[in-house]
Amino acid sequence: MGELRTGSVIHFVLPGDIDDVTTPSGGNVYDRRMCQCLPDLDEVAVPGAWPRPSADTRAELRRSLAACPDGEVVLLDGLVACGAPDVIVPHADRLRLAVLVHLPLAGETGLAPAEAAELDAAERAVLRAVSAVVATSPRAADHLIQRHGLAGDRVHTVVPGTDPAPLAPGTDGRSRLLCVASVTPRKGHDLMVEALATVADLPWHLDCVGPLSHAAHETRVRRLIERHGLRDRVRLVGPLSGEPLDRAYAAADLFVLPSRAETYGMVVTEALSRGIPVVASAVPDALGDGGLLLPPADIGALSGTLRRWLTDSDLRRDLRESARGRRSRLSTWEDAAQDLARVLANLRG
């Protein structure tokens, strides 16, 4: 496939840390792949503690937008845009702004009610002012329309893509479990440990791959592991990328993601692209018919499903077939980039 184009140079305002391999995230991967697939995106990195920027960071963002000529199309990562409505909204009439929302700001688990309300109000002010909003799943698009009272024709869906990958050989076909996610309350590692404690009579090992950047929750998860005597069976590996991450997927017999909330769940499609069976919650758009979707925060459902996986060969066969069927229908990053290019090109009118 030839190079994809948006039609002209478009400024893409980023949080500034999307290439930091020590803190990988789905949003960072998505942003980076769009930049790789759309060479006419002009990256404008604004490092800072988004969505809680300092005065200096806000000033840098203000300078970056002021440098854009009138009528230019500017795509902004939602962490940046929705974290600084006082900077963004004044430019909404001068520039053609689009905001890419990976996760609604108030959707992060563990926020105090007052903080969640403040972030929600900031996000609403920005999304109502800009020309277009890009969500990463149909469910997320519907959520934004309803939550912020947005016109449906201004909200677009650009689903993440996947890279072609070889089928994962796994280990013994059942006992090697993998979770790829930051160890934060939203991802549900604590729920997973509690559920696995109920199947400790069966053979399994779990590798949790992902940043250990939420100290309080990491401590909680480690204490649960110790309390249930699972120290030799559950590993918090930390972040992996490149070949080490590929090896972790290749060894997996089952992928588990017990999230309390997700916008899409890119790691689910990464697993499915390798034909790995999936048990997950809060990821209906990513999972499709490729695995078992469980209710969020339901330890009983997760425990029962894991026991069935470990004891029922028919279920394992069915889930492998489901994963491979979904694998054949996943879209690519080039498909996603073309969808985004169409949205941005239409902003020029």
Image: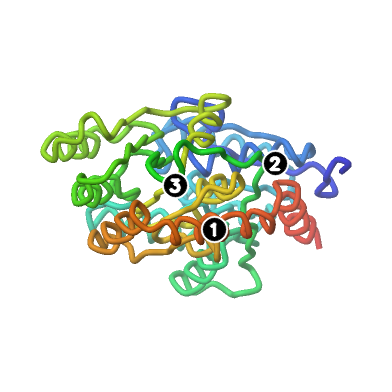
Q: Point out the frontmost of discs 2 and 1.
A: 1
Label 2 – label 1 distance at C-alpha: 28 Å
The residue drawn where x is 36% and y is 28% is 237
- In the displayed structure, would residue 216 be above or below residue 285? above
Which residue is labeled 2 in the image? 11
Helix, strand or loop at label 2? It is strand
Compare marks 2 and 3 and give the one earlier in the sequence. 2
Q: Which residue is mark 3?
A: 255
**Left or right of 303, for residue 132:** right
Q: Which residue is mark 1?
A: 286
Amino acid on which the number 3 mark rests in the picture: Phe
Residue 94 % position (x, y): 68, 54
Quarter of the picture containing the N terminus is top right
Quarter where residue 172 is shown: top left
Q: Residue at x 20, y 36 (%)?
A: 230
Tell me, yes or no, whether the two marked residues, 2 and 1, touch with CB atoms within 8 Å: no
Q: Residue furthest right?
A: 2
CA gap, disc 2 and disc 3:
37 Å
Report x, y in % for residue 246. 56, 31
Q: N-terminal of the two: label 2 or label 1?
A: 2
Task: Specify the amino acid type for callout 2.
Answer: His
Q: For this view, does 185 lie left or right of residue 198? A: right
Residue 12 on image: x %, y % = 66, 41
Q: Are marks 2 and 3 in contact (CB under 8 Å)?
A: no
Instruction: State which tag comes first along the sequence, 1 or 3.
Output: 3
Q: Residue at x 53, y 44 (%)?
A: 27
Q: Residue 243 sits in which quadrant?
A: top right
Which element is circle 1 on? helix
Distance of label 1 from label 3 (alpha carbons): 13 Å
Mark 3 lies on a secondary structure that is strand
Q: Amino acid at mark 1?
A: Ala
